[in-house]
């Protein structure tokens, strides 16, 4: 037993209370910059300038907003003093960034803060200085309409916090990122950033989100996406899968114009890029979500860097679908190929003679199924021998653009020009101008290189297409389509295959048995941790399927929900596609190559294989000419 008497309880002095609160709101200079800029935005500013040095220990934020009345200047620095809400109900109908009335008080507790303001109808400005929590008297001063807040000697009275500050460079980077985020959310406001007096960034007022994103993001080409889903409106600006980064930091998410850290929405972005990125690659995307005000709680974190949705599902869907739909249109293909290509060579007379690779012609003329050059020719998944529509309707390994089109008529209308490419019999004499070919069919096939790449050209570049990756993509898209239409070639197993799963795995799989059946996967529960596989898609190997199923079960147990399934279907189809298509090392005829390209036009996303590897590589003639020293 302790001998000492209980310790005395007492109320903390307001000074200590302020410092504790300051620790929450202004942990780092970047947080302070965020609070001050948000105040300027709340005041309706059209132009905001941020100037800082010493890694943010000295910051000045100037705005042209509506200002503060002289008799309220001192009150603005008091804790819980705000002009933005009056009652708790207002928290559910917020239209401002601020509402807690804490930022100025917290910052003033740990710095020397000068607040100067002039409402637009006032003749002159007033200012008040607060020294580490001690508010001085307000006095008149000169100045433009609007408000300026100057912070000096940040954290001078809390040495412990000073120690936690990162290097000057680290804090500077953080402040810049914060400002970028604020600017991305508020394109109609002009932003200026000065460091040590030097103007570093000027982002003029922009008309659109895309225009602002172009001012700030360093991606070469950016595209737009938008989606309304159950009252949730998601808009996004993103770079194509050609421009990626190695971490998720280039995915910026805003909810109600607030920059937030939300793993769920970040996952929604990453998932939209499924099948387009390689392992370890992350997209560049800025997403802005506006939700009905009563669907989202922004008051769960002192720095408001997190939000909570009443139901996160529609938020996720809005973001995910906005991006996915935009990606499925593959906007990067549009401008890559000039609309009217006049081929310099008639492709009926293959231009392979012009190539210096001697055996290219021989290989390319070789009869595909008889080729003994193909290392995997023992069981070649060639177009002739592949199962064609015998039982089900899956015809991935078959290169018949005509059949493909008939079967899926009306599905491809998102890319009108492709329908034409596919209905016309495979272009047998490319000399005849085909007016509305898709970007891939429009290429002139020159030959096959290394039994792996289709060599083609258009008017301004050489294009190498990875035949396996291309075919895999086409097969994958067809499978996904067959799945969504409920048409998959199914093989019943005479002896059911037992698949072992982790705890609760069987129940998880059984819960989605109907969906699996649509994929041609029929299972029965035979134990808590095992299922029997009774039927499977004809195209996939047992072992590969067992692996996919156990992974699927694990994910449902961990994360639940139908979204998991949608993603997994994609994984299953990718695996199936990979096992069913033409390999590298297999000779292809001119017709087969053209047919493959024509099929790629069926699916706009076909510039990436389902594992995210690029399907084609370009060599612009301009580059060749530079390499040959023809031009400098
Ligand atoms: P909050 O933003 O949560 O209301 P703050 O402590 O950040 O709390 O600001 C207190 C009040 O001071 C605000 O409600 C607003 O009325 C006023 N204020 C602060 N900054 C500005 C500014 N830049 N322009 C006009 N008014 C401001
Ligand atoms: Mg505020």
Image (spheres, rainbow, N blue to C red):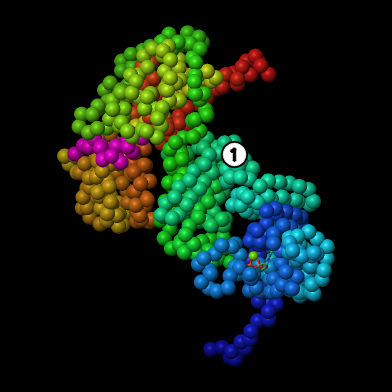
**Is 31 rendered above or below residue 194?**
below
In the figure, residue 470 lies in which quadrant? top left
Instruction: Evaluate whether residue 600 shows in this view.
Output: no
Residue drawn 47% across and 27% down? 616
Image side of residue 344 versus residue 411, left or right: right
Per the image, is 490 magenta?
Answer: yes
Q: Quadrant of residue 522?
A: top left
- What residue span does the magenta drawing correspond to? 477-492
Q: Residue at x 59, y 39 (%)?
A: 219
Q: Quadrant of residue 237?
A: top right
Q: Which residue is mark 1?
A: 219
- Queried whether the magenta region covers residue 157, the answer comes back as no
Q: Is residue 560 above or below residue 520?
A: below
Q: 65 left or right of 381?
A: right
Point out residue 235 in the picture as x, y percentages from the top left corner.
50, 48
The answer to which of 229 and 473 lies nearer the viewer is 229
x, y percent for residue 444: 45, 17
Could you tell me which residue is drawn at 21 percent across and 50 percent down?
A: 524
Q: Secondary structure at mark 1?
A: loop
Name the spot of residue 512 as percent of width and height, x first.
28, 51
Q: Considering depth in this image, is 131 or 545 the residue closer to the camera?
A: 131
Left or right of residue 418, residue 508 in this image:
left
Q: Is residue 604 visible?
A: yes
> Which quadrant of the picture is home to ligand 2?
bottom right
Q: With respect to residue 594, does 213 lie above or below?
A: below
């Amino acid at each position: 037993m302790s001998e000492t008497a209980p310790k005395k309880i007492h109320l903390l002095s307001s000074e200590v209370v302020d410092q504790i609160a300051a620790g929450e709101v202004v942990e780092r200079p970047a947080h302070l910059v965020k609070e001050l800029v948000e105040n300027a935005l709340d005041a309706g500013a059209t132009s905001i300038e941020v100037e800082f040095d010493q890694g943010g220990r000295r910051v000045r934020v100037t705005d042209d907003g509506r200002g503060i009345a002289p008799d309220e200047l001192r009150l603005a620095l008091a804790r819980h003093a705000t002009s933005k809400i009056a009652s708790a109900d207002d928290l559910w109908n917020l239209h401002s960034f601020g509402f807690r009335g804490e930022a100025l008080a917290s910052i003033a507790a740990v710095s020397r803060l000068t607040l100067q303001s002039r409402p637009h109808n006032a003749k002159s400005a007033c200012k008040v200085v607060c020294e580490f929590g001690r508010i001085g008297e307000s006095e008149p001063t000169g100045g433009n309409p609007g408000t300026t807040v100057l912070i000096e000697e940040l954290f001078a009275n809390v040495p412990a916090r000073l120690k936690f500050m990162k290097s000057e460079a680290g804090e500077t980077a953080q402040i810049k990122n914060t400002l970028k985020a604020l600017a991305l959310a508020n394109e109609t406001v002009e932003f200026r950033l000065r460091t040590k007096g030097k103007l570093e960034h000027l982002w003029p007022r922009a008309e659109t989100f895309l225009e602002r994103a172009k001012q700030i993001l360093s991606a070469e080409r950016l595209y737009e996406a938008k989606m309304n889903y159950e009252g949730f409106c998601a808009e996004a600006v993103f770079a194509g899968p050609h421009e990626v980064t190695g971490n998720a930091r280039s995915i910026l998410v805003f909810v109600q114009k607030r920059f937030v850290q939300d793993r769920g929405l970040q996952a929604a972005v990453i998932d939209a890029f499924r099948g387009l990125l390689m392992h370890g690659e992350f997209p560049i995307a800025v997403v802005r979500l506006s939700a009905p005000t009563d669907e989202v709680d922004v008051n769960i974190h002192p720095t408001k860097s997190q939000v909570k949705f009443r139901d996160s599902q529609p938020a996720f869907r809005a973001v995910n679908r906005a991006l996915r739909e935009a990606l499925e249109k593959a906007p990067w293909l549009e401008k890559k190929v000039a609309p009217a290509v006049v081929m310099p060579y008639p492709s009926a007379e293959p231009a392979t003679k012009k190539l210096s690779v001697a055996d290219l012609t021989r290989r390319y003329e070789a009869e595909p199924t008889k080729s003994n050059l193909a290392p995997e020719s023992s069981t070649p998944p060639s177009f002739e021998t592949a199962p064609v529509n015998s039982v089900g309707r899956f015809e991935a390994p078959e290169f018949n653009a005509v059949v493909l089109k008939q079967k899926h008529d009306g599905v491809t209308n998102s890319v009108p020009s492709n329908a034409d490419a596919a209905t016309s019999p495979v272009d047998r004499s490319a000399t005849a101008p085909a007016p509305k070919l898709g970007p891939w069919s429009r290429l002139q096939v020159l030959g096959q290189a290394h039994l792996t790449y289709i060599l083609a050209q258009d008017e301004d570049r050489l294009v190498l297409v990875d035949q396996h990756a291309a075919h895999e993509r086409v097969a994958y898209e067809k499978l996904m389509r067959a799945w969504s239409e409920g048409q998959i070639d199914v093989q019943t197993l005479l002896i059911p295959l037992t698949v072992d799963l982790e705890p609760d795995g069987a129940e998880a799989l059984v819960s989605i048995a109907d969906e699996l059946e649509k994929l041609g996967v029929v299972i029965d529960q035979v134990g808590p941790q095992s299922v029997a596989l009774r039927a499977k898609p004809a195209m996939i190997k047992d072992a590969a399927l067992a692996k996919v199923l156990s992974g699927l079960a694990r994910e449902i147990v961990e994360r639940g929900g139908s979204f998991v399934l949608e993603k997994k279907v994609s994984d299953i189809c990718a695996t199936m596609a990979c096992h069913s298509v033409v390999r590298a090392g297999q000779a292809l005829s001119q017709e087969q190559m053209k047919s493959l390209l024509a099929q790629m036009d069926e699916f706009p996303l076909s510039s990436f294989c389902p594992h995210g590897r690029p399907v084609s590589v370009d060599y612009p003639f301009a580059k060749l000419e530079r390499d040959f020293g023809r031009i400098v």
